Image (cartoon, grey):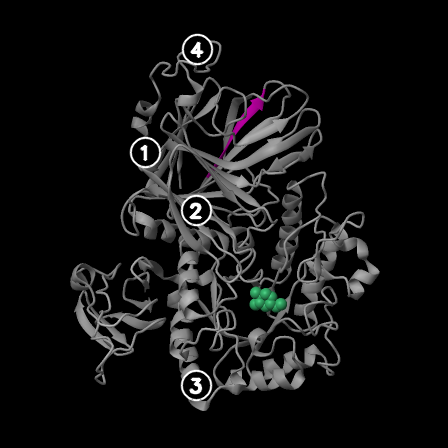
Amino acid sequence: MNCLTVEKSIFYIETARSCYAFSVEKGYAEHLYYGAKIPFSDIDVLKEKRSVILVNALYPADDPTYSFDCKGFEFSMPCRGDSRSASLCLVCDDIPFDFVYDGYEVNPAIDSPMPVPLKYDSAVKVSFKDMAHGSMLNLYYLVCYDCDVIIRFCEFVNNGERTEILKFASSQTDMPATNKKLTTFHGAWGRETEKREQFLTTGIYRHGSFSGMSSAECNPLFFVSDCDAGENHGEVFGFNLMYSASHEISAEVTPYGGLRIINGIQSENLRYTLEKGENFIAPCSVMTYSACGFNKASRNLHDFVRCAVSPIKEIPVMLNTWEAVYFDMNEDKMKSLADKASQCGFECLVIDDGWFGERNDDTTSLGDWYENKKKFPHGLKEISSYFNNIGLKTGIWIEPEMISENSNLYRNNPEFALKCDEIRHVVGRGQYILDMTDEKVRKHVEDSVARLAEEYGASYVKWDFNRRFADIKASKGSGYYYDYVKGLYSVLKNLNRRFPSLIIENCASGGGRFDLGMARYTACGWASDNTNPLSRAKIQQGVSYGYPLSFTLNHIAESPGHQTVRTSTLKDRINTAYLGVFGVQADITKMKEEELEFLAKAVDSYKKHRCEIMSSEVYRISAGNDGYRITQTMSRNAESGFLYLMREKFDTVTQLPVIRLRGLKKGAEYRVYGQGVDVIAYAETFENAGLVLPQNYQGAGREKDTLMITDGGTLLLRIKIKE
Ligand code: DGJ
C-alpha cells in the first residue's frame, strides 16, 4: 500500500482517515499538518507565507522573513532560533548541532534495539546531516494505514567526536493551540490509569515517570484534543510510547498560538555518551487521529495493538494462587485447588509467588528459581504433570529481573545486583534489581525463564517486577534505563523466538509497567492488583483508552477485596472481569457449592464468547462523570456484543440511565437481555432513543422483577442481532 507521497519537497503521509505533512525548506523539516485527510495538492497552501510577525524574531541569515518561532518543526534543538522547548539536545565539542536535510529512503531496513511494530504498511527514513560534526539524524515514519496510526522515532548516528545526549525525544508534533485539552492517565499501586484532563494554556505542562519504569504513577498513554471533545465527537490526537522505562511528555502552548507536543524518553538526568561510529535509536512514538472523539481514537489504538504489537492469543481461563494462598503453598493445596479448578472448567493454574527457594515471605530467595522441596517434595514437574492430567495448563510466576540479598544467586554473584556499596543502600520490597545491561545477568534471566518451560512444563509465565530503580550507574543518569530495557527486550525477544507458544503475562506490582514496550513481547497485562469491582471498573476504563480487551487481564477475587476491604457480590465481580482476559485469584476450595456452580457457568459462558470479546470494538458509553461506568462491545460484524454497567453510587428515588448503544447495524433488530433485562428494538431505537432498563430499586418497595443495582452494583447484558 502506498501511504507516502514525496513531491516538491513535501512529505505527505496518509492513513485511511488522516494525513501528516511536512516540507523541507532551507534544509529544515517544517511541520505543516496533522489531522483529517486533506488532498496532497492543497498541502502547499499551508506553508507559512507571512513575513516576520515578531519584532524580536530570529531567522536564518539569508532570510529575514523566516521566523523560527512561528513555524512548526519535526524536531528542534536548543539555541538555534526556535525558543520553544527542544526535542533533542546533543553536545559535542563546543559547537552546536545544525542538521540540514540530506535525503530520504522509502521502506528502509529497521534495526532497532527498541520494540518496533510487527507490521506496518510503509515506512520512510528522512535524513539530516549535521554541518559541524558530520553526524546524522534520521527521522523514521511508519504507517499503519487501516488503524490510522503513524509511528515516529529518531536515530542519531555519531560520525563526530564523543557526543553526549541530554535529550532525545521520539516525536515532536507542532499544531495550532486553539482550544486544546490534554488527557493523561495517572495513579499509584492499586489505583492505576485514572484519567485526568486539563485545558492547555500558555506555558509548559510536563509529565512523565522518573522511577525507571513506565509506572503506575503515569502511563505513557495521553491524548490532545479539542477542549469540548467527548467520547463520540471532537478532534482527538492519541499518543503512546513503545517503551517500558522512564518517559516524558511535554505540552507547550506558546504566546504565538502554537502547541508543541514532545513525546519520548525521560530527559531529566539523561547523560548518554556516544563514541564515534555509535548510534542511538529512540523508542517508537505512536500517534493516532480521530475526527469523532476518544472512542474512535481508542479503537484505532486497540486495532494497532492487536495487529502490530501484541496479536490476540487464546489465553487459558486461569486460576491464580496469589490471593488464594499467598506464600503458604504446598503440594496438597495446589492439587486441591487444581481439582476444583478443573471441575469448574478452568484451563490453567498459575502458581504465583512462593514456590521457590526458601520463599515464605517477601524478604528472600528471588533469583533461586528452583522449587522449594519442603513445599513440593516431589518437585514442581510432578505438580505440573498432575495439572496437565486433569486438563489444566501450568502457569508459573517469576520475577526474573530481581535478586534477594538472602539468596544463593546473591551469595554466588553479588555483582549481579544493581546497588552501590560505597553509599547507603536503597531497598524496595527487600530486594534489588539485577543489572540487565550485563550479558551474564541476561543469560541468567533467560535461562531462568526457559527452565520454567523446559523443566517444569510451564506454558504460561507470569513475569512480575516489584520494585523501582535506585543507585543506577551515575555516568549515564537516566540513560541507564534505556540500556536496561534494551537488555530486557533482548531477553524477551529471545524467549519469544525460542518458545513461540509460551504465553507471557506482563505484571509489575499490578500495572507498574503496563505499556506498549512490554506488550510487544507479552500476551496480556495485569492492570492492577485491585480487583474490587468499583475500583476495577474505573481502572479498566482507564486502560481501555489505549489498550484492547485482548491485552487486559481481569481477575475475580474474594469479598471483601484484599485491597479495599469492600464487599461485593460474586455476580458483580464476574460481570466486571468478563470483558477482557478472564481469571480468578481466590481460594475456590472454600467457596460454597452454589458459588462454585455460578462460577463454573461464568467460565463456560466466557469460553464460548472469548473470541468475540478479544476482537470486539469497544465503546465507552459513560466514563464516570454521571456516576456510571458503562462500556459496550460490538463484534466486528455488528451482530453481537455486551453491555457492562457499573453504578458507582446509589441514591434513593433515582432511576438507571437510558443507555444509547453504539455500532449497531442500521435497520437491524436487536435483543438486549440477561440479568433481569429483555428488550427488543431496532438499531435506530437503541442508538437514538436508547435502552430503557426496567425499574430499579427506589429505596422502598420491591417487586420480583425490580433490578437491585445499588452502590457498586453491575449489569452485564448480551446484545444480539435478531435472526
Ligand atoms: C505483585 C503482583 O501484582 C501480584 O499479582 C503478585 O504476583 C505479587 N506481586 C507476588 O509477589
Q: Which residue is mark 4?
A: 63
Distance between mark 2 and mark 3 Cα atoms: 40 Å
**Residue 140 x, y percent position in the rendering:** 51, 36
Q: Which residue is mark 2?
A: 222
Q: Nearer the viewer, residue 521 or 650?
A: 650
Q: Earlier in the sequence, mark 1 or mark 3?
A: 1
Q: Secondary structure at mark 4?
A: loop
In magenta segment, residue 572:
no
Residues at marks 2 and 1, CA–CA distance in whole angstroms: 18 Å
Residue 125 part of the magenta-drawn span: yes
Q: Nearer the viewer, residue 407 or 388?
A: 407
Q: Which comes before the other along the chain, label 2 or label 1?
A: 1
Q: Earlier in the sequence, mark 1 or mark 4?
A: 4
Magenta stretch bounds: 123-130
Residue at the image point whose x is 57% and y is 50% from the top: 244
- Magenta span dominant secondary structure: strand
The residue to which callout 1 is attached is: 178
